[in-house]
Amino acid sequence: MSYLVLILAIFLGYALVLILKPSSKIIQLLLSFSGSYLLSITVLHLLPEVFTSPNKNIGLFILLGIVFQTTLEYLSKGAEHGHIHVHNIKNNTPWLLIISLSIHAFLEGMPLGFADNRALLWAIVIHKIPIAIILTVFFKKANFSNFKTILFLCLFALMSPLGNLISQQILFIKPYEIQINALVIGILLHISTAILFESSENHQFNIKKFIAIIIGFAIAFISL
């Protein structure tokens, strides 16, 4: 079921663009909510879990995850947390964007294969919907064909389930479960905090975004 939910999240975002054509303000609210939900699940659920391990290098792997995600965002220009610009790439395939997002999606799917982690699953799903909306809008503004748009979204949609499958089936990965989870925690911490820190234009207080963030925190806390 987790495979299907992860894939459907991407195409729900695609459908929302086609049907509702959400404004940039609505997309930012969705991003703020998803960022706060993702951060809450990471802090309240994932962090305590990895620190129960006797492994003394957990903090190091979390920091490595932050550094790795920073590198990916250099390639994707921040698409993972809503920063994406058309500029001069119209009608050209942005391979760096595709590769970096695919790596990110693959890695965040890996902890789902180690255990039945419903909290993380829904956090990833909620995060993927606004990202899929942003990607769809981006491809439309870049004058990509519908075929090309759907092809990339299919690739993106399959990466998290693939990460899930690999961590389940490849036996030599299992002993590194804690390290991989810590790495992904660093990635999620970077993404979620970037969303929250950059969710307000010119760093001005926005009551609607603040409420979306509080709702995300509350729902995550209640759902655990």
Image (cartoon, grey):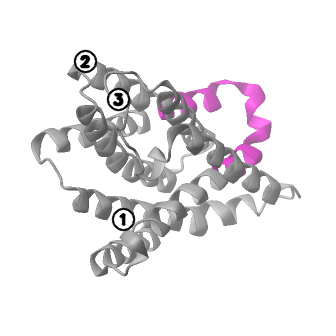
Q: Quadrant of residue 104?
A: top right
> What is the span of residues highlighted in magenta in the rendered image?
160-184
Magenta: predominant secondary structure element?
A: helix
Which is more toward the observer, 73 or 57? Answer: 73
Query: How far apart in space, not on screen, are marks 1 and 3 (Cα)?
Result: 22 Å
Which is more toward the observer, 37 or 142? Answer: 142
Q: Write the residue at 45% across / 49% down.
A: 124
Secondary structure under tag 3 reads helix
Label placed on residue 105: none
47 left or right of 140?
Answer: right
> Is residue 224 something one can see in this rendering?
no
51 left or right of 124?
Answer: right
Secondary structure under tag 2 reads helix
* Of the image marks 2 and 3, the number of the one nearer the N terminus: 2
Amino acid marked by disc 3: Leu
* Of the image marks 1 and 3, the number of the one nearer the N terminus: 1
Q: Position of residue 92 (x, y in %)?
A: 37, 21
> Is residue 209 something one can see in this rendering?
yes
Evaluate if marks 2 and 3 touch, with contact meaning CB atoms under 8 Å apart. no
Amino acid marked by disc 1: Phe
Q: Which residue is mark 2?
A: 147
